[in-house]
């Protein structure tokens, strides 16, 4: 039965990876895979001899001797546990997405355009690189890429020039998202799963991530594509709404407040995100001068309530992405519950080559984590990190977790389809896969390796 479940997972995983070839949204195989795996586990529960307790991170003793009803109870408890952990991530993402959309409702991101005063291609490259690096650490790398490419389209008229800028924005955004607990979905997963803390994550990864952005940008600044000047319209570049700048700074501050809230209260991050959303929504209601209802259940509400910022934001958030995360995380949880990931990790530890680095008495190879980063350029990094959560039992803030966060977050830059930022840029600018592979991939690889070496050296000395 275990073999059949693994085959189903692999087939579903392939369907997700080949999303663009099959022309089927990746949420469909993710949801189908999740449902089929758990259903087959329920039907074949009596045939399983081991079960993994995720709460205690160990196999349940005497599971094989339990009766059918007891085994079903264990399965239901595991399903509820994993759904709760997954929901924490999804609710957190929903809150962050809504805040970003509220900012966009007031055209707040147009404020960023006013920062660009130069016509030099090289200076504009550095401006966008640093903006992507900083902004992605606050509003996540996907949203930062969308915002910056939208601004780029208004500044750079020549499409060939925009392609080069977009490629470097992808690298910088993924690098910026890796060192922040709210900058990338995979890093958020590790943070919410209590594998990394905010302070340690920034301390371990800020310099490697910065190098991952600086090295490719420095090399690119000498390429012919970034020589000379560009022509763009001279306008104020400010937001259309008089409250745009205020909502931008309020929204970004509210998101940054979330890690602080978690550190002070020790409550799950989604609680702080809901508080931040409530504050931002309150000011949005005041500024919009219209009645706003978060729910449209009240049919007697006036028509103006349906055009308010909160309602508008909730209609624009990426629900397909939320459903995809639900499907893939719960599918990986199914394999984790059977103990397959735990057993694989144990075999991996025992078979590690001598080049591995000893961490907390366990032989873990840096090469394996680097390969995870390279693999994230080919397949989605979310299930890779989800699998690592079930494989390793190292304590919070162990360097292993920070290295995984870096590798999974930045490795996807090496291919245009390797990260959410790359995929959205591909759609917005119609970037060709092979163009990116030829022009940008080598820059991303150099940046990735530079940051990885920096991390290993830092861990050795500090």
Image: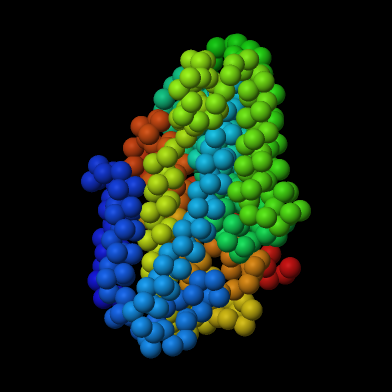
Instruction: Give coordinates of residue 328: x percent, y percent.
Output: 39, 56
Instruction: Give coordinates of residue 379: x percent, y percent.
Output: 38, 55
Instruction: Give coordinates of residue 166: x percent, y percent.
Output: 48, 34
Q: How many marks?
A: 0
Residue shown at 51% from the left, 58% from the top: 84
Direction right: furthest residue: 264
- The residue nearer to you, when weighing 187 against 27, is 27
Q: Is residue 417 found left or right of 270 in the rendered image?
A: left
Instruction: State which quarter of the image contains the N terminus.
Output: bottom left
Residue shown at 54% from the left, 53% from the top: 88
Using the rendered image of the protein, determine whether residue 241 is visible from the camera's viewpoint: yes
Q: Which color scheme does this rendered protein use? A: rainbow
Q: Relative to 393, is 447 above or below?
A: above
- The residue nearer to you, when weighing 86 against 191, is 86
Instruction: State which quarter of the image contains the C terminus.
Output: bottom right
Using the rendered image of the protein, determine whether residue 341 is visible from the camera's viewpoint: no
Name the quadrant containing residue 341: bottom left
Q: Relative to 165, is 308 above or below?
A: above
Q: Relative to 209, is 302 above or below?
A: above
- The residue nearer to you, when weighing 417 against 280, is 280
Residue shown at 52% from the left, 41% from the top: 94
Name the quadrant containing residue 440: top left
Q: Relative to 318, is 386 above or below?
A: below
Instruction: Give coordinates of residue 100: x percent, y percent.
Output: 57, 33
Q: Is residue 24 found left or right of 310 in the rendered image?
A: left
Residue shown at 34% from the left, 58% from the top: 34
Q: Is residue 133 found left or right of 263 in the rendered image?
A: left
Direction front: furthest residue: 300
């Amino acid at each position: 039965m275990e073999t059949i479940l693994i085959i189903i997972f692999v087939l579903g995983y392939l369907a997700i990876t080949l999303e663009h070839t099959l022309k089927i949204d990746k949420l469909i195989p993710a949801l189908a895979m999740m449902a089929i795996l758990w259903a087959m586990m329920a039907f074949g529960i009596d045939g399983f001899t081991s079960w993994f307790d995720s709460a205690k991170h160990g196999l349940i003793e005497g599971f094989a001797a339990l009766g059918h009803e007891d085994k079903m109870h264990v399965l239901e408890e595991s399903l509820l546990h994993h759904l709760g952990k997954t929901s924490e991530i999804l609710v957190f993402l929903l809150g962050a997405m809504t805040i970003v959309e509220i900012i966009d409702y007031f055209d707040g991101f147009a404020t960023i355009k006013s920062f660009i005063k130069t016509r030099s291609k090289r200076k504009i490259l550095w401006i966008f690189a640093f903006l992507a690096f900083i902004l992605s650490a606050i509003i996540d790398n996907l949203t930062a890429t969308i915002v910056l490419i939208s601004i780029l389209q208004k500044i750079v008229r020549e499409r060939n020039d925009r392609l080069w800028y977009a490629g470097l924005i992808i690298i910088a955004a993924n690098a910026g998202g890796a060192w922040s607990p709210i900058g990338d979905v995979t890093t958020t997963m590790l943070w919410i799963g209590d594998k990394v803390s905010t302070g340690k994550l920034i301390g371990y990864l800020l310099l490697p991530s910065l190098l991952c952005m600086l090295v490719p940008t420095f090399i690119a600044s000498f390429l012919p594509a970034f020589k000379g000047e560009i022509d763009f319209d001279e306008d104020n570049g400010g937001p259309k709404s008089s409250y745009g700048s205020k909502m931008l700074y309020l929204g970004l501050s509210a998101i940054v407040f979330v890690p602080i809230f978690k550190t002070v209260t020790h409550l799950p991050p989604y609680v702080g995100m809901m508080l931040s959303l409530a504050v931002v929504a309150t000011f949005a209601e005041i500024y919009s001068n219209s009645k706003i209802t978060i729910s449209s259940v009240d049919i007697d509400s006036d028509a103006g309530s349906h055009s308010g910022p909160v309602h508008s934001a909730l209609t624009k958030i990426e629900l397909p992405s939320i459903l995809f995360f639900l499907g893939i995380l719960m599918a990986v949880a199914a394999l984790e519950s059977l103990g397959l990931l735990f057993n694989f990790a144990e075999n991996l530890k025992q078979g590690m080559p001598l080049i591995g680095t000893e961490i907390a008495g366990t032989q873990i190879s840096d090469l394996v984590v680097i390969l995870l980063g390279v693999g994230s350029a080919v397949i989605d990094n979310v299930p890779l990190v989800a699998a690592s959560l079930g494989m390793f039992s190292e304590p919070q803030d162990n360097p292993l977790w920070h290295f995984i966060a870096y590798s999974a977050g930045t490795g996807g830059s090496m291919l245009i389809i390797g990260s959410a930022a790359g995929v959205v840029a591909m759609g917005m600018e119609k970037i060709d896969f092979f163009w990116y592979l030829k022009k940008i991939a080598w820059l991303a690889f150099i940046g990735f390796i530079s940051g990885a070496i920096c991390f290993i050296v830092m861990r050795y000395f500090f």
